[in-house]
Amino acid sequence: MLVFLSAFVISCGVVQVSWEAEVRQALLDGVEEIAAPGVPGPLCVFGDKAVTVIVGKSGNGIYEPVVAASVIGEGRVIAFGHTGYLDAPSLEIADTKKLFINAVKWAAQKTAPKIALRHNHEFAEALRASGFEAESLDGRDWLDELEGFDVVCVYPALLSEGEIRRLQEFVQKGKGLIAADLGWGWLQLNPGKDITEHPANKLLYPAGILWADGMLDRTSKQGFSAKVEPPTYCHANKALDSLLAFERKQIDLRKEEIAQAVWSVSTAIRTLPASDQNLLPKIREWATAQPDLTAPTPEKPIGMDNPLARLFVTLQVRELKRLPPEKVQPHPSAKFFPGGVPKEAKRVRKVVEVDTSIPDWHSTGLYAAPGEVVTIRVPKESVGKGLAVRIGAHSDTLWHLPTWRRCPEICRTFPIDKPEVKVANAFGGLLYIVVPRGCKLGKIQVEIDGAVEAPFFVLGKTSLDDWVQRIRYLPAPWAELATSKVVLTVPSDVIRNLDHPEELMDFWDKVLDACAELAAIPKERERPERIVADIQISAGYMHSGYPIMTHLDAAKVMVDVACLMTNSHGAVWGLFHELGHNHQSPDWTFEGTGEVTVNLFTLYVLDKVCCIPPERTRKELSKEGRAEALRRFLASGAKFEVWKSDPFLALIMYVQIQEAFGWDAFRKVFAEYRRLSPNERPKNDDEKRDQWLIRLSRTVGRNLSRFFEAWGIPVSEQAKRAVADLPEWMPENFPPK
């Protein structure tokens, strides 16, 4: 159990409620649970008067603030970790309305405050319905209209520098401010920018509250429980002071306290502005007195048993990300991962063509050496159009992991905001031109000067002779093999002896075409999928996304056609599985089937491309494996909870459909889902199961109600009636007696 702040202090023999307890008591009166609109993100709480009000989970037993309160001058502020807290529908979920009523009264320091909102008529109407005087201010001179209002509610991301200053002045005079925003969402909408540039963080830095990157998990069914006591070390400054005292052996801390404290301080380091004079100077002072601090490497990882070393690395990474390119030096760990570049390797000047109708990363076949400046030149008309330069393919951040085998963040992105841009990364990495969606620049020429050539094969473009004789031996430590459908990023060591890259990439094109075929999408893609091997990734053995991330052992498998065709390594299933996640649809994936329907793609690829039928892909799907799984399932009472907790048990049900009706059944029903209008799509899990029964039954021309019932899948009577006109179907000898 974590040590929490005491709610009371003793002064002159009188029991007094602490500031933290007083704030939480006022705000949480009558509140047990609040909504979690969308995917809320964490707040960073560090100021002397800043208080964590409600927390969310951040994995590994860590909690982070999702609601916080503080003061600026004579006024009070409250911050929420998602813009949705200022959306009227959120007020109707759990006790969110009660919290908001408490919040406006506390912030305004009045029981009947007059409330202003910026561009938010619906929320103003909801507040008026609750008995408040509330008004949405929409004009350009809205700040001039604040006179007479007691509290103002805003989305800070929309504020200008001038508006931020005036709002701070408004609060300092004793008024109230409620701000709702999101860290990770703002970063997605502002590629190449740093979280310190978020207008919300400029607004509430004086209050000791910031919006951090990351996402929060719920602590209750509808959102976040107000009954979860915020750990003491959710407060970054208190956490740092305790870690320093622990290092000096002045206090003892339990493992869970260390983990919480390190996380809170690490988040603060990555979120505070460079000008901070509150927390950062303490860490710098401590770090300069530690001559033997090291960076994480595969041989010498840094774990929670060395908390201040983790903070030192965090500070290093933070400051390296903010250095101008000319001042960047190679990081000591770069030679271990992602790898150094031979000093004698030629630095080249190369012009690459970028088709801006294709979004996201564009490979250049070039590598930026650690700490070296590379110059990028683009046509004037390309400036300020959202283009960016990325150094590094290893996009996973590892801040949340208990052990780091590499630095937790090793990529860097620079906006192309002028015709000539200089870039550098202390860790080095493959160079990419990043194109925003909807870019209308057509094909542009980009000149790159000062980088090292990397092994780069493009199917249909790269000469096989050139590959065999020269390209595969180029000096960069990372290589890429590409088609218009997929790009593989692997250590150069694994392709030095690759004689037939065209055969390999033709195979991968067939894999991607098979996925598209089953998903009922065009085989010609908007942009290629990417698969990147890494020494350490953020979650699991592999994970889906852009890019798909794998561990290094999968790199050799990715470039071995024989291994891929014969499914002779566990990574083969994993690679096709993660591609499946990237093609999966939530419309036909109800609760418990996220790791089930994905494997329809795995099985389809293995069947259609590798000629391995489902029953030969894994022992769980063999005749014997299926019989044993069914025996256990039926003996347990054929319960839905059991079914959805065992992905390979649940997959048997889908394989039975495939064996009876062929893959065409899935292709047709998935195509039907693609054609649905927004109003026709299922809105919740009950509707997903009902629609799956109805649409699949009509696709195969059989009533599958009894089949679903035998597997324990709950569907409504209405759904059963919708397919009652079809002939009933059950697999032969199922369920087994």
Image: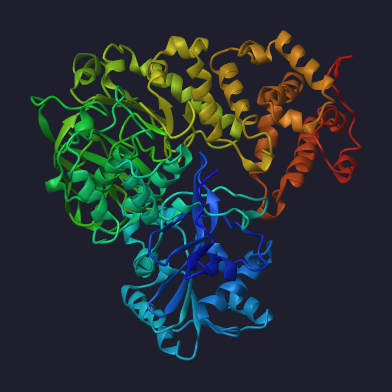
Q: Which residue is the extreme one toward the bottom?
A: 148
- How far across and how far down the image is residue 161, in percent? 31, 73
- How far across and how far down the image is residue 43, in percent? 45, 57
Left or right, residue 606 beside residue 499? right
Left or right, residue 720 beside residue 465? right
From the viewer's perspective, is residue 222 above or below residue 580? below
Tell me the quarter of the picture where residue 479 sits: top left
- How far across and how far down the image is residue 534, in percent? 36, 28
* Residue occupying the point 38% across, 39% down: 397
Quadrant into which the C terminus falls: top right
- How far across and how far down the image is residue 419, in percent? 17, 54
Tell me the quarter of the picture where residue 727 sits: top right
Say how the picture is coloured.
rainbow
Quadrant into which the N terminus falls: top right
From the viewer's perspective, is residue 119 above or below residue 439? below
* Residue occupying the point 37% across, 49% down: 242
From the viewer's perspective, is residue 177 above or below residue 438? below
Left or right, residue 434 beside residue 608? left
Left or right, residue 451 beside residue 557? left
From the viewer's perspective, is residue 22 above or below residue 143? above
